[in-house]
Image (cartoon, grey):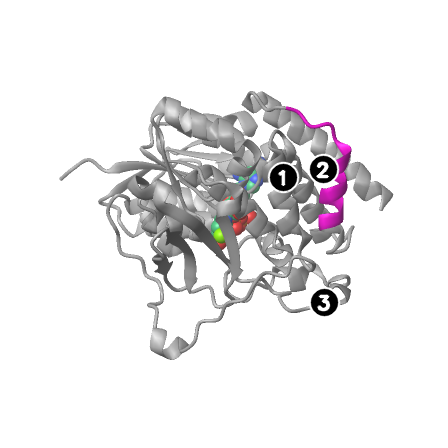
Amino acid sequence: MSARRGVTILGSTGSIGCNTVELVEASPDLYRVEALVANSRVDILADQARRLKARLAVVADETAYPALKDALAGTGIEVAAGAAAVADAADLPADWVMASIVGAAGLAPTLRAIRRGATVGLANKEVLVCAGQLMMAEVKTHGATLLPVDSEHSAIFQVLDVKQHDQVEKIILTASGGPFRGKTREFMSSVTPEQAVAHPNWSMGAKISVDSASMFNKGLELIEAYHLFNMPEEKIDIVVHPQSVIHSLVAYTDGSVLAQLGSPDMRTPIAYALGWPNRIPAPVPRLDLASIGTLKFEAPDQTLFPSLRLAREALRAGGSVAAVLNAANEVSVAAFLARKIGFLDIARVVERTIEGVNHRELLSIDDVLAQDQVARRFAESVIGRL
Ligand code: NAD
Ligand code: MG
């Protein structure tokens, strides 16, 4: 029997993390678990660590350390806490690392995995939004492998022939349109966090669910695609496809358009990244096209969703604009979830933050982290003045 593949899951207690744990747990002959990392959910983390016989379990929140230590006492599983321990966990010798922390908090540990030359399944799109150029350069320098987990990017990765890169006319990202598709700005001005996180097709963490409702998610994915596939902004289109059956498409110069389809279930793109370059079974509902009958498409409404314009402008501007957009969006989504601002304020705060901060070139990850902090403080002050 060949040696089992070492796996680390950054953000194991989240929506992507739990789905990854399920797939890993289903094949104990194939995988052994090095580290599991979470923010503060000790109950779920400790249970996962026991079930998967992890070598190390880490919580970012230091106040949760005693509870984690207690929960894993006598198991032989190492425990640690704090931001430095989170990044250190990525150094353990796992061949495959799932980057599924939410937000810029995932930058440092993802970079550590890349610098070891690991194969990284990337769900944490904010890493590429904030630091795409630097991260892609690090991947190259250290011979790491970056496998997209975001369903749209997994779809493109599966149908984009890198040898024909110069014969690609466009890549087309599909978007469900979220829960507020077809609504008015007046309607959106008074929506609650509960309405915003109730996604019609996908079950996901709170932040990405709000991003889907505002379509900032598609804006972040546009920036993610630009870096992952080395594709200019004007060659990346967005089409709304409310059923989320076609996960994205690549259009070639001869008029051929290739797509990847599947049920809207993240276990398929996670399994693709976990099994790559092979395919492994995933227990997802099978696609039944006859029962779906019709697939629908429409152009995105740019007036209803200023996020799409802001993301395109950020890509064209370059430098730190995308990192600032991301930080301001993280701060405003948190404020919206805490009921401190309205839904439409999210894009307002992002735009004012982009206009208000001094932009700079990002020459190192430290530059990115510093600019992230500047943008967060600025966004907080914009929120204070709303
Ligand atoms: P989630 O909120 O459900 O989970 C986030 C995970 O990150 C949790 O395990 C949490 O404990 C951990 N975490 C948060 N802050 C941390 C910190 N400072 N240090 C260490 N761990 C921390 O989010 P999710 O929906 O699983 O999304 C995770 C990432 O994947 C996001 O970037 C999201 O955009 C992306 N993504 C998610 C989906 C999906 O279907 N859920 C699809 C595509 C992409
Ligand atoms: Mg996606």
Dot placed on the residue nearer the N-terminal end, 2 or 1: 1
Mark 3: give few (<14), some (14-19) or many (20+) Cα within 10 Å: few
For the magenta stretch, what is the residue range? 347-360
Say which mark, if any, is on residue 291. Answer: none
Q: Nearer the viewer, residue 176 or 55?
A: 176
**How far across and how far down the image is residue 385, in percent?**
86, 42
On screen, residue 370 above or below 130: above
The answer to whether the residues at label 2 and label 1 have Cβ atoms under 8 Å apart is yes
Horizontally, is 81 left or right of 251 in the view? right
Disc 3/disc 2 C-alpha distance (Å) = 25 Å
Horizontally, is 368 left or right of 124 in the view? right
Q: Amino acid at mark 3?
A: Thr
The answer to whether the residues at label 3 and label 1 have Cβ atoms under 8 Å apart is no
Q: Amino acid at mark 2?
A: Ile
**How far across and how far down the image is residue 11, in percent?**
48, 42
Q: Which quadrant of the view contains residue 256?
A: bottom left
Residue positioned most to the left: 1
On screen, residue 280 above or below 105: below
The local secondary structure at tag 2 comes to helix
Residue located at (61% from left, 27% from top): 369
Q: Is residue 269 magenta?
A: no
Residue positioned most to the right: 385
Q: Is residue 356 magenta?
A: yes
Horizontally, is 38 left or right of 148 in the view? right
The reply to whether residue 86 is visible in this rendering is: no
**Residue tagged by mark 2?**
354
Q: Amino acid at mark 1?
A: Ala
**How far across and how far down the image is residue 253, in percent?**
36, 51
Q: Nearer the viewer, residue 59 or 164?
A: 164
